[in-house]
Amino acid sequence: MATNEILQLVVFSIFFGIAVTAVGKKGEPIVRALDSLSHVVLKMVTYVMKLAPLEFSVPCVLLLQKWDYSR
């Protein structure tokens, strides 16, 4: 599975970018598709970042409700 080796990804990305650039006009649809995909992924990350405080605070509130403060 994943072993946190990012070097392969960097090398692949460089070669892919060089190849798409070398193709010229035929590579433009791929560039546009990847640009659109990056916008979608960034929007998803924005949603996750906005929901993160809620996802943390709800379990904390539920935990605090179980404690007995009457002592």
Image (spheres, rainbow, N blue to C red):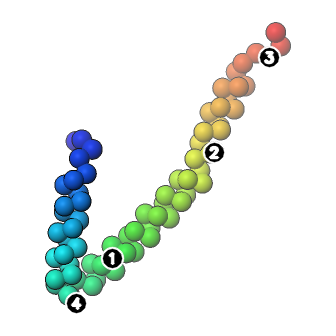
**Quarter of the figure with residue 36:** bottom left
Three-letter code for the amino acid on which mark 4 is drawn: Lys
Q: Is residue 46 above or below residue 30?
A: above
Mark closer to the chain start, 2 or 1: 1
Task: Please state the total of marks drawn on the protein image.
Answer: 4
Mark closer to the chain start, 4 or 2: 4
**Quarter of the figure with residue 13:** bottom left
Element type where label 4 sits in the image: helix
Q: Is residue 22 above or below residue 55?
A: below
Mark closer to the chain start, 2 or 3: 2
Three-letter code for the amino acid on which mark 1 is drawn: Ala
- Give the spatial CA distance, label 2 vs label 3: 24 Å
| Residue depicted at x 44% and y 67% | 40
Three-letter code for the amino acid on which mark 3 is drawn: Tyr
The answer to which of 22 and 49 lies nearer the viewer is 22
- Give the spatial CA distance, label 1 vs label 3: 56 Å
Mark closer to the chain start, 3 or 4: 4
| Residue depicted at x 40% and y 68% | 38
Disc 3 marks which residue?
69
- Give the spatial CA distance, label 1 vs label 4: 14 Å
Number of other residues with Cα within 10 Å of mark 2, as a class: few under 14, some 14 to 19, many 20 or more: few
The answer to which of 9 and 30 lies nearer the viewer is 9
Q: In the image, is 6 to the left or to the right of 53?
A: left
- Give the spatial CA distance, label 2 vs label 1: 33 Å
| Residue depicted at x 57% and y 47% | 52
Disc 1 marks which residue?
33
Disc 4 marks which residue?
25
